[in-house]
């Protein structure tokens, strides 16, 4: 018998304010047509003034707890992926811990930008397999609207705010790929590429800063690296693309998502798509897509789900799980 980290519940939260592409036409030299055709994005949500990343994360966490039929006190640990924590410290995870009324266990943030949720899942899985926690709340929460240069048309039209959460629970399995739960992970980073996607603020400048991106360069790396990491994670457990029921990709750009599916020889009807409605919500995009896909009745127990993401660092990776 082996221990597996099995999905017990999911939830998400999106701020009320929906910003349609057309809204950017009023302040920038851009069009709805350009944004749609280059990125697949039609709209995104922006947090209200005063609404923080931990507010969004706590709302998603409460939804996941309700979905799992659990209380906050049933959770042993929170792993929260974000690059837009409310404050430099304490972690957004401990803020979520307080907001959901959890007074035991432990909580911490993981920062791997858009790949953050994949890294958080791998971390939570490792803690469950090593017996450090039985139930882990894994959250991806972001308010990227707070780090956008609203005059930079090459970046500000692409990102949005939101949060998603998933509860992983230890369950006994046989060790084979028929088990439910996380089956494999593949994590990568290469710090030589820090200048193609970064925020120009932090302790080195004394200000929060804004997002800077060489879009074309990031695009090129994404198309090259995402299918590779997804296939590597599948190969680790002897699975192939033909075994995959759903690809749940990081939702940055429809053209990247299509390119990755094509490289994996998977049709687009096996891909969960939310980029049109959420934009790029960085570490929140995968848990949002998992929760939306499950709520829509698409992702069902027993299916093989592959998540893959790439972001600043560069950092990228994939997780294979049986739902
Ligand atoms: O989450 C992980 C990190 N992010 C990503 O994965 C994003 C990766 N990159 C991308 O998604 C794409 O590169 C973009 C959507 C950012 C851009 O698409 P592209 O096809 O690579 O366009 P481009 O950057 O080559 O720009 C083409 C043209 C440029 O004009 P010139 O130089 O050809 O005259 C841009 O100035 O489009 C112009 N442009 C715009 N035009 C209208 C850039 N942004 C806009 C805009 N509206 N919002």
Image: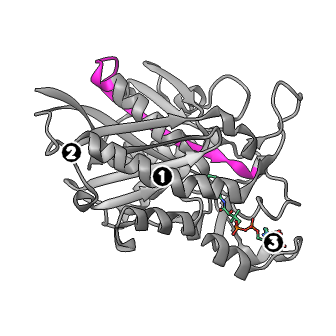
- In which image quadrant can residue 92 be found? top right
Mark on residue 319? none
Is residue 142 shown to the viewer in this render? yes
Say if the magenta span includes residue 5. Answer: no
- Residue 162 vs residue 282, the one in the foreground: 282
Mark on residue 238? 2
Choose the circle earlier in sequence order: 2 or 1: 1
Quadrant location of the N terminus?
A: top left
Magenta part of the chain: 128-145
Asked if residue 34 is positioned above or below residue 144 in the image, the reply reads: below
Say if the magenta span includes residue 139. Answer: yes
Task: Give the residue number, with chain letter if any, for mark 1.
Answer: 226
Choose the circle earlier in sequence order: 2 or 3: 3
Task: Give the residue number, with chain letter if any, for mark 3.
Answer: 24
- Residue 197 vs residue 26, the one in the foreground: 197
Dot 2: within a 10 Å radius of its alpha carbon, few (fewer than 14), some, or many (20 or more) residues? Answer: few
Residue depicted at x 55% and y 63%: 256
Image position, residue 108 (x, y; %): 54, 24
């Amino acid at each position: 018998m082996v221990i597996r980290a099995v999905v017990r519940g999911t939830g998400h939260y999106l701020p009320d304010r929906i910003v349609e592409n057309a809204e950017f036409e009023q302040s920038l030299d851009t069009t709805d047509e350009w944004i749609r055709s280059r990125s697949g994005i039609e709209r995104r949500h922006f947090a209200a003034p005063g609404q923080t990343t931990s507010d969004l994360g706590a709302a998603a966490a409460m939804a996941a707890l309700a979905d799992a039929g659990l209380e906050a006190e049933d959770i042993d640990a929170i792993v929260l992926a974000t690059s837009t924590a409310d404050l430099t410290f304490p972690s957004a995870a401990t803020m979520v811990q307080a907001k959901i009324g959890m007074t035991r266990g432990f909580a911490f943030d993981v920062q791997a930008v858009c790949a953050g949720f994949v890294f958080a899942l791998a971390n939570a899985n490792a803690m469950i397999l090593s017996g450090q926690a039985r139930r882990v709340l894994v959250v991806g929460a972001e308010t990227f609207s707070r780090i956008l240069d609203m005059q930079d048309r090459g970046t500000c039209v692409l990102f949005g705010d939101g949060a998603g959460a998933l509860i992983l629970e230890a369950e006994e399995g046989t060790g084979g790929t028929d088990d439910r739960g996380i089956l494999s992970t593949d994590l990568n980073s290469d710090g030589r590429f820090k200048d193609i996607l970064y925020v120009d603020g932090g302790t080195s400048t004394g200000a929060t800063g804004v997002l800077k991106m060489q879009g074309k360069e990031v695009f090129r790396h994404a198309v090259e690296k995402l299918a590779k990491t997804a296939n590597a994670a599948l190969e680790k457990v002897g699975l192939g693309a033909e075994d995959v029921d759903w690809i749940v990709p990081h939702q940055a750009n429809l053209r990247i998502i299509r390119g990755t599916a094509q490289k994996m020889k998977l049709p687009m009807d096996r891909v969960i798509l939310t980029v049109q409605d959420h934009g790029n919500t960085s570490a929140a995009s995968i848990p949002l897509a998992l929760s939306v896909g499950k709520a829509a009745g698409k992702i069902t127990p027993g299916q093989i789900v592959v998540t893959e993401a790439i972001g600043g660092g560069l950092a990228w990776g994939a997780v294979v799980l049986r739902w």
